[in-house]
Image (cartoon, rainbow, N blue to C red):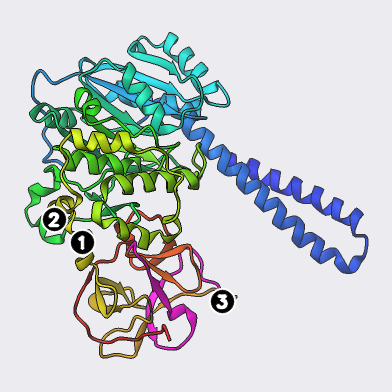
């Protein structure tokens, strides 16, 4: 029925546009152009309408049916006398339906005796619909009685809004969640167990993916947090040997950093180590900074594979892309924590070296001293040695990844890495090639195959400090191994776009000269 209505809408709009163009451009010679333009406009408009309809239909269903994606080995019985949690959810201009679906997922899939309260923190939203509709929903559903509505005095930004909510919380454990999530079965108990065993342990669930258009719930693989010298968070996969023991699919996994949106922490410990740096603005880099603080000041950080929460990855952030705040926040974190490795940060972000607009950090340096935090070298040697400068080969190195040839068969081979390169299969005349359109464009979703080497740009690649390969024909696409080798939008989070390298040399095709 929906498709029929869309077809009728497209036909009606097409007729309207053709009539308009016929009036504006009466010359018969331009009729074909007018019709083509009308068709293009019609399909563009109706595509957006259809996407909006699909999204609304998905979120209008206010109760969720998230699949239980737990690995069968995950326990279904837990410790008794677990600490109670205050779940802190900050939002700004959130969809009311998304927010209500999220709360329903928590209420439906969490033992209510473990929830002290659910704090909904409205960070100065520009429209009140989310709070009003959620409050109205609460009045009609008694199981929402633990939900409390908080409003910041102004738009504080995500970082300060989280601290605002944490100060209002009464539970022994703080659980921070983004406002566009849906929790899975038995998500909370594994987090609380780890904190009960060790209060200075900070724990994060696996972040599964909820498709923005269909609301389909997709399981994510087990991975951990990493970073680069620009202090940008990325996902790292454990070495394949880690999973030789099948129990490692469910065991807690040490993580150098956290993504930041979803984690649990003992409330007393959170404030003991300085909460968030409230000298930071809006959002960005606060997750890396608190990760440094946890590890260097006596705590530890883990990913808990048996705890899973789905996350809607939106196309636009409600707070916008605050590039200035991200730069400022990263600079604050670097100047507080990197010690003698600060030059490595400036090599990655040279435009920030002369920047002094990062605010007063004296209180954070004093906190670092009072907590008797370890030097950053300890973090590099014991937590994330992958970041040590001596472990970062810069040229004449190779990549170990399977490639997919033109017949879709896979086979592992070695490739050479230099900053600007042609990647050739050893002892052959075949090079890694990005598929081009008939117009010579390299687009999202383009296949990557081994073809006869030539000098054209679709065989030329750049490798950067994020361990990404980007084709010369597109600065926004990265080599991705999620489904064979394809080109997908760069996300700066590692995972399927993070290419590990070793120091073994076969063939070097240097295109830098």
Q: Are marks 2 and 1 in contact (CB under 8 Å)?
A: yes
Q: How far is mark 1 from mark 3, CA to CA?
A: 40 Å
Name the residue nearer the viewer: 193 or 374: 374
- Residue at left offset 42%, top offset 39%: 359
Name the residue nearer the viewer: 301 or 279: 279
Residue 461 located within the stretch drawn in magenta:
yes
Q: How far is mark 2 from mark 1, CA to CA?
A: 8 Å
* Crowd around label 3: few <14 · some 14–19 · many ≥20 (10 Å): few
Splitting the image into 4 quarters, where does residue 268 fall? top left
* Crowd around label 2: few <14 · some 14–19 · many ≥20 (10 Å): few
Q: Where is residue 396 in the image (x, y as percent from the top left)?
A: 27, 80
Magenta range is: 440-466
Residue designated by label 3? 440
Q: How far is mark 3 from mark 2, CA to CA?
A: 46 Å
User: If you read the primary sequence from the N terminus, does the residue marked by circle 1 or circle 3 appear first?
Assistant: 1
Q: Residue 388 carries which label?
A: 1
- Residue at left offset 36%, top offset 44%: 332
Residue designated by label 2? 381
């Amino acid at each position: 029925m929906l498709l029929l209505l869309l077809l009728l809408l497209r036909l009606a709009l097409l007729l309207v546009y053709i009539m308009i163009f016929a009036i504006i451009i009466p010359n018969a010679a331009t009729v074909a152009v007018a019709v083509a333009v009308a068709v293009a406009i019609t399909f563009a408009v109706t595509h957006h309408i259809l996407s909006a309809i699909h999204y609304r239909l998905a979120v209008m269903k206010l109760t969720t049916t998230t699949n239980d994606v737990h690995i069968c080995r995950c326990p279904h019985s837990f410790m008794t006398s677990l600490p109670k949690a205050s779940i802190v959810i900050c939002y700004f201009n959130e969809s009311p339906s998304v927010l209500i679906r999220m709360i329903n997922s928590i209420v439906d899939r969490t033992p209510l005796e473990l929830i002290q309260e659910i704090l909904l923190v409205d960070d100065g939203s520009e429209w009140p619909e989310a709070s009003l509709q959620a409050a109205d929903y609460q009045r009609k559903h008694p199981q929402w009685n633990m939900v409390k509505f908080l409003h910041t005095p102004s738009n504080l930004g995500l970082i300060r809004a989280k601290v605002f909510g944490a100060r209002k919380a009464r539970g022994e454990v703080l659980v921070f969640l983004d406002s566009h999530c849906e929790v899975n079965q038995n998500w909370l108990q594994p987090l609380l167990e780890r904190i009960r065993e060790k209060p200075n342990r900070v724990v994060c669930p696996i972040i599964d993916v909820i498709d923005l258009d269909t609301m389909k719930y997709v399981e994510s693989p087990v991975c951990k947090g990493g970073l680069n010298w620009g202090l940008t968070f990325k996902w790292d996969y454990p070495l394949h040997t880690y999973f030789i023991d099948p129990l490692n699919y469910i065991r807690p996994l040490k993580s150098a950093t956290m993504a930041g949106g979803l984690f649990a922490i003992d409330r007393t410990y959170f404030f003991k180590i300085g909460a968030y740096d409230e000298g930071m603005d809006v959002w960005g880099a606060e997750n890396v900074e608190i990760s440094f603080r946890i590890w260097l000041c006596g705590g530890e950080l883990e990913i808990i594979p048996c705890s899973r929460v789905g996350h809607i990855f939106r196309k636009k952030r409600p707070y916008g892309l605050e590039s200035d705040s991200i730069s400022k926040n990263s600079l604050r974190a670097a100047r507080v924590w990197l010690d003698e490795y600060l030059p490595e940060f400036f090599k990655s972000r040279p435009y920030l070296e002369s920047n002094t607009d990062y605010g007063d950090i004296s209180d954070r340096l004093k906190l670092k001293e009072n907590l008797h935090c370890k030097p950053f070298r300890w973090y590099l040697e014991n937590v994330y040695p992958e970041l040590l400068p001596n472990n970062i080969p810069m040229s004449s190195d190779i990549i170990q990844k399977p490639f997919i040839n033109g017949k879709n068969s896979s086979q592992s081979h070695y490739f050479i890495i230099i900053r600007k390169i042609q990647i050739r299969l050893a002892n052959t005349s075949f090079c890694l090639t990005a598929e081009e359109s008939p117009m010579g464009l390299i687009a999202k979703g383009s296949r990557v195959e081994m073809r006869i080497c030539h000098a054209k740009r679709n065989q030329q690649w750049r490798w950067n400090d994020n361990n990404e390969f980007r084709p010369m024909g597109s600065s926004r696409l990265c080599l991705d191994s999620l489904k064979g080798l394809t080109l997908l939008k760069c996300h700066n989070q590692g995972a399927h776009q993070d290419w590990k390298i070793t120091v073994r040399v076969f063939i070097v095709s240097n295109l830098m000269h």
